Image (cartoon, rainbow, N blue to C red):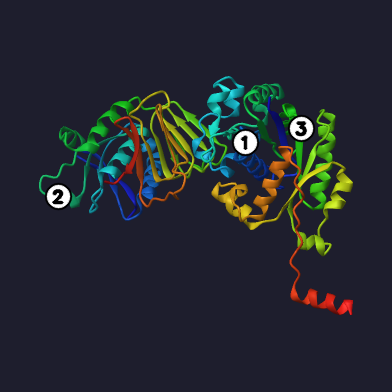
Amino acid sequence: METVTFKGSKDGISMVLDCHVNFEELCQIIVQKLWQSRDFLGEHMTLIINSRDHLLSDGEKLALKVLLQSLGHDILRFTSTAERNLPQEQNSFSEIADEKECVDLSMFEHMESYLSEGRTMLVRKNIRSGQFLEFDGTLIIIGDVNAGAELKASGHILILGTMRGVAHAGCKGDRQAIVYATKLLPIQLRIADLIARAPDDEEMDTTEAEIAQIVDDRLVIESAFE
Amino acid sequence: MGEVFVVTSGKGGVGKTTTTANIGTGLAKMGKRVVLMDTDIGLRNLDVVMGLENRIVYDIVDVASGQCKLKKALIKDKRFDNLYLLPAAQTKDKTAVTEEQIKEMCDSLKEEFDYVVIDCPAGIEQGFKNAVAGADWALVVTNPEVSSVRDADRIIGLLEASGLNEPKLLINRMRPNMVKQGDMLNIDDMLEILAIKLLGVVPEDDSIVISTNRGEPAVLDDSSQAGQAYRNITRRIMGEDVALMNFDVEEGFFSKLTKLFKKN
């Protein structure tokens, strides 16, 4: 079967995902599919994400939500056949958001409010040394950002690829902004008024997608899939 | 009042940035207050060679355009408290600053620092003109090869035209055994063509490649031959009289043997 397919049901339109490809690739295919079928599906959809037998992590859900919202769509809920076997599994954002002890999800709330303003720029190319991208809204890069390149956005910055350059999210002072990358190895990161730089002596490396955000007045980088 | 000198060459890849980093660090190690200024806007490297890339927030273009004060853009070195870097911008080009602006920065920097060392971009266009605008004297870097010497000669002419009359020469990446075999220009040949004062000769050295990639100038490495050459050059800039290093190659067993037979 195809990696991304759309299905209609009585609840609305489901996007059925085959999660056997890696997540970055999956995101790219989703963007492509939504773009190809924009005349047919419309520009503002509320989708049900069906990940079949795969259970999406919170980080993956977050990345998908940000990605879809940035493209003008919204997510009604996540479902999967894997979840049905678990007792009382939460599968909708509104339900989960009520559970205050769930740390990750408070993030979803403010992101929703921020992203409802909705301006997003999607760039599909590698950003090389000396190139500078600035956008008033959320910036999504599908490709790598090399050392010497600079990104600046008043909203979030999401990189579906390797980030080796300098990124400044929330550049107009929004401390809720995040920087997400499949491989986050930046020379320097800035969110709102805070700056963090790469360590001097250690070689940076990471095997998983990470999110940088401000927690208690400090810029922290954490795994996106915890 | 300090002095401002520009490290230039015309040709690219001869070692301007490496020289700037090493001499600047060498001067700082001797206790001088030093600023390194990168004027290679759009192709900056000095920050990487110094290992300070991750500290850059403001750059020379921000200062020129008045977006930040000169002092705020200076990055303190991680090894020496008396060494600073004014980085170039990477996302702009050479036309983002003017000669007057650079001159103004140099004038205000030399009031507070003993040495301002300017890393000049390759070429003879706006970037070169900017770099030499505020300099009191110039250090021309060349390699022992014909094309590099040709470009150095062109640069010396341009420097003289802009009033920098007595440039000094640094011969970089010298390979003594190749010179000995006659495969490389020797020092005397180059001095005859260029007719300027020789400040020093730096040998080709693998430790330069290693130190450049690590962001640690070779001048701090006591075991590096190139580092020793840069330390000598530093002392000459400070006015000391230091003899040129002797690069005689160790003779192999066979050449010694042949000599022995020739004697008899």
At a point 67% along the width and 46% down the height, the residue shown is B231
Q: For mark 2, does the 10 Å Cα neighbourhood hold few (<14), some (14 to 19), or many (20 or more) residues? A: few
Q: For the residues labelled 1 and 2, say whether their Cβ atoms are less than 8 Å apart.
A: no
Provide residue B217's location: percent of width, then percent of height: 60, 46
Q: Is residue A42 visible?
A: no
Residue B186 percent across, percent down from the top left: 83, 55
Q: Position of residue B20 (x, y in %)?
A: 66, 40
Outermost residue toward the left in this view: A87
Residue A83 x, y percent position in the rendering: 17, 49
The residue tagged 2 is: A84
Question: Relative to A52, is B205 on the left or the right?
Answer: right
Q: Quadrant of residue A194?
A: top left
Question: Three-letter amino acid code at disc 1?
Answer: Gly
Q: Is the same chain shared between marks 3 and 2?
A: no
- What amino acid is at disc 2? Arg
> Pointer 1: what residue?
B42
Residue type indicated by callout 3: Trp
Mark 3 lies on residue: B137
Q: Residues within 10 Å of mark 1 (few under 14, many from 20)?
A: some
Please name whichever residue, B142 or B94, is drawn nearer the observer in this view of the structure.
B142
Q: Tell me what residue is drawn at x 76 percent, y 69 percent.
A: B251
Same-subunit check for callouts 1 and 2: no
> Camera-side residue: B139 or B3?
B3
Front label number (1 vs 3): 3
* Alpha carbons under labels 3 and 2: distance apart: 77 Å
Q: How would you rate the neighbour count of disc 3 (Cα within 10 Å): few for under 14, some for 14-19, many for 20 or more? A: some
Q: Nearer the viewer, residue B39 or B245?
A: B245
Q: Is residue B111 left or right of residue A115?
A: right
Position of B102 with respect to A104 (left or right) is: right
Disc 3: which chain?
B
Q: CA distance from mark 1 to mark 3?
A: 25 Å
